Amino acid sequence: MADPAIIVKNLGKRYTLGQRSSGSYRTLRDTLAGLLNQESGIKNLESKEFWALRDVSFEIQRGEVVGIIGRNGAGKSTLLKVLSRITEPTTGRVTLNGRVASLLEVGTGFHPELTGRENIFLNGAIMGMKKTEIRARFDEIVAFAEVEQFLDTPVKRYSSGMYVRLAFAVAAHLEPEILIVDEVLAVGDAAFQSKCLGKMHDMAQCSGRTVLFVSHNLSAVRQLTAHCLVLKKGQVSHLGNAESAIEHYLQSNEVVSNDVAQQPRVHECSGGARFVELRFKTSPAVFTSGDRMEFITVIVWDKAVSEARISLTIFTQESNAVGSGFSATCIRAESAGHSSLAVCIPAVTLAPGRYHCTIALGMKTGGTAVNMDAVSNVLHFEILAAESDGHTPLQWSPNWGSLRLSGLEVSPLT
């Protein structure tokens, strides 16, 4: 039987960009700015409507951990602010069945002049808890946040990492039925992020609480959430299990082009040579784990170069680096011109999935290695599962990572 914790129907949030309406309050600064614009011949821009969210509808059941992903500007933060009742919706309605704790931005919900201890009790009171309830969880909150030494210091003197640790500990331990967490956890260190992910998982699995988690870290979304909502230009473009949602998001945002000139360049390059073509020998670029992979590159040289090397870094679709390799022999250009080269990777032992590369051309100058050119987001390819070799199952779990190791050799000690 359905037991929704969050119901969103036809939700919309509209903002007005540009000129203020004639009836709104104007400050002295606004008036002076308007006069200066008139003097300089600059006309006021007409007001424009911008819908940060439009016709958003979904339900989240009690005890679910749901991810929300999308590009910057897709409407994720606006949605969370509406769900947290920080922002009023323009259209539609939201039904929240339970007490809500939100962690949206560093500093949200804390009074900077109050100490950490005082802010814990303040936040609990805001959530409708009694002092006895807060005291019962107080030691647990402080231990999780690891800020005991600074508990009686005003939080305005905290670092951003300390702020986030205490804010998350308060939000997670004061027993909310619904926990809403934005990208703010990225401020913390890796150990604390892992600790927070574990806590959110425990909240859902053991306590039956509902968690909404927004992050650009797709690995964390995949690890933590069972279902995922994809926002695109303020609308729901996909709602389903986490794997299908991440796949939909990556496919809809993937930029694949054979025109190297259009791809992102690394700025810290010395120049002197540049890649003008990069393509796999086979099309489509689909390989089986363990296959030999070859691609063609064309380099234009602005001058003679005696010793240069190509380096390649492979990334997952989530932009996590898998590994790098370097050309074993040096590349030489006798004079300005171009070279067409075939590059081979003998055996790519990657897990099934989609990948892309960053390729760089480097040389040594005065004993220091410098990049002449480097291009990212190129050479997109897909790895298919290899047939079972007696050691590895045909199905690969994303939790196992991206590197496919060969069968481990086990022998008794003598």
Image (spheres, helix red, strand yellow):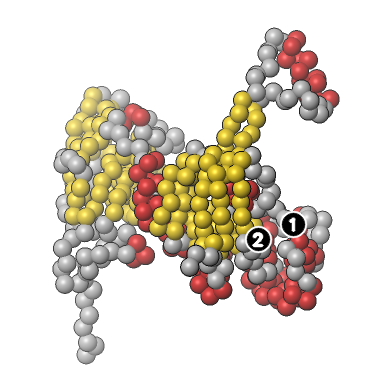
Picture coordinates of residue 328, whole percent (x, y): 23, 48
Residue type at mark 2 is: Ala
User: Which is more toward the observer, 391 or 230?
Assistant: 230
Say if 28 sits above or below 380 in the image.
above
Say if 308 sits above or below 210 in the image.
above
Q: Residues within 10 Å of mark 1 (few under 14, many from 20)?
A: many
Residue with the mark numbered 2 = 101
Please tell me which residue is depicted at 34% across the width and 62% down the height of the picture. 398
The part of the image, by quadrant, that contains residue 400 is bottom left
The total number of labels drawn is 2
Residue 38 visible at all:
yes
User: For this view, does 406 lie left or right of residue 242?
Assistant: left
Say if 280 sits above or below 158 in the image.
above
Numbered mark located on residue 110 in the image: 1
How far, Cα to Cα, is label 1 from label 2?
A: 13 Å
The part of the image, by quadrant, that contains residue 185 is bottom right
Q: Quadrant of the C terminus?
A: bottom left
User: For this view, does 114 lie left or right of residue 94?
Assistant: right
Please tell me which residue is depicted at 57% across the width and 44% down the height of the picture. 11
The part of the image, by quadrant, that contains residue 277 is top left
Picture coordinates of residue 158, whole percent (x, y): 72, 58
Q: Residues within 10 Å of mark 2 (few under 14, many from 20)?
A: many
Say if 56 sits above or below 26 in the image.
below
